[in-house]
Image (cartoon, coloured by chain):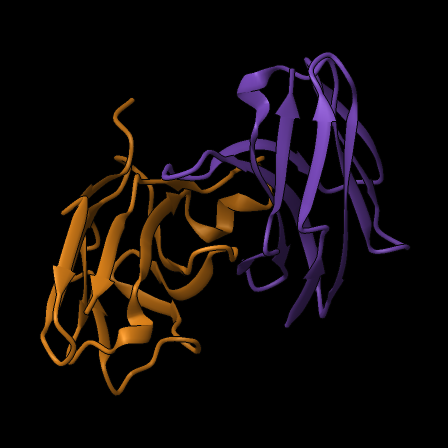
Chain colours: A purple, B orange
């Protein structure tokens, strides 16, 4: 199975940068996903990493180190609408997707 | 493309009653998932289908929960009888068939969920 850890809460100022870390332990690794979830809404897909390195997509970037069981999601130029929960999810070799508990990011003016 | 459809959006029942949720995945998505999300937690997988077959139901409380996907398209999740701890959001998600997922960046697409309150 998977054990996925991420911080519970983070607070940052509008325009700033925030980095959300995720560590995982899995019996077989087949990709890592980041999802954004606004309160009362469904999770929406943000990024996918299967190889080591940085994937950049606009203001959001995601990094993966498979040897360290570590990923981070970087949010740049924070906007108020970025206030949400960010979920780290790991896909195992049997194609099960397991989620962490989520990190609630609060953006303040 | 149309997204994952779920109904109802909200449901309030008393403990020991029964409830059913419906999900229609994105057209062409062979894999369908039901997740339970308790407030403040990440989604927890209950059951995963590929077409009309069950891939994984190891975390489904089978004494009270059941799910089916008879024609390999839409799916129903049932709870009978409900307990207080079943209060949660039930999310349905779909994706390409398992054999294609490793070849493509194939994320899960989620529906808006059904918020269940058991009193």
Query: How many numbered discs, if any?
Result: 0
Residue A59 appears anywhere in the view = yes
Q: Quadrant of residue A4?
A: bottom right
Q: Quadrant of the N terminus of chain B?
A: top left
Q: Residue furthest front?
A: A109
Instruction: Give percent across and percent down for residue A6.
Output: 71, 52
* Residue at horizontal 57 percent and vertical 28 percent from the top: A83
Please give left or right for residue A84 compared with residue B115 in the image. right
Instruction: Give percent across and percent down for residue A11.
Output: 71, 33
Instruction: Give percent across and percent down for residue B118.
Output: 21, 67
Q: Nearer the viewer, residue A86 or A47?
A: A86
Work out whether B104 lies above or below B72. Answer: above
Please give left or right for residue A17 compared with residue B86 in the image. right
* Residue at horizontal 14 percent and vertical 47 percent from the top: B8
Residue B74 appears anywhere in the view = no
Q: Residue furthest right?
A: A67
Instruction: Give percent across and percent down for residue A73.
Output: 73, 34
* Residue at horizontal 66 percent and vertical 67 percent from the top: A2
Work out whether B11 lies above or below A2. Answer: above
* Residue at horizontal 71 percent and vertical 70 percent from the top: A27
Please give left or right for residue B24 compared with residue A52 in the image. left
Q: Quadrant of the C terminus of chain B?
A: bottom left
Q: Nearer the viewer, residue A90 or A83?
A: A83
């Amino acid at each position: 199975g998977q054990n996925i850890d991420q911080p519970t809460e983070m607070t940052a100022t509008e325009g700033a940068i925030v980095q959300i870390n995720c560590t995982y332990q899995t019996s077989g690794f087949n990709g890592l996903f980041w999802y954004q979830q606004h309160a009362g809404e469904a999770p929406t897909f943000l990024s996918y990493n299967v190889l080591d390195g940085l994937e950049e997509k606009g203001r959001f970037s995601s990094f993966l180190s498979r040897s360290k069981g570590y990923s981070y999601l970087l949010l740049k130029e924070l906007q108020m609408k970025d206030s949400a929960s960010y979920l780290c999810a790991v896909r195992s070799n049997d194609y099960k997707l397991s989620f962490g508990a989520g990190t609630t990011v609060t953006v303040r003016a | 493309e149309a997204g994952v459809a779920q109904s109802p959006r909200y449901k309030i029942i008393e403990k020991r009653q029964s409830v059913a949720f419906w999900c229609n995945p994105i057209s062409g998505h062979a894999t369908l998932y039901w997740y339970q999300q308790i407030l403040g937690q990440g989604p927890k997988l209950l059951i995963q289908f590929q077409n009309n077959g069950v891939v994984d139901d190891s975390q489904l409380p089978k004494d009270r929960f059941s799910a089916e996907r008879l024609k390999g398209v839409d799916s129903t999740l049932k709870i009978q009888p409900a307990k207080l701890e079943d209060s949660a959001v039930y999310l349905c998600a779909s994706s390409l068939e398992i054999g294609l997922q490793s070849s493509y960046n194939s994320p899960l697409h989620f529906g808006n969920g059904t918020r269940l309150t058991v009193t």
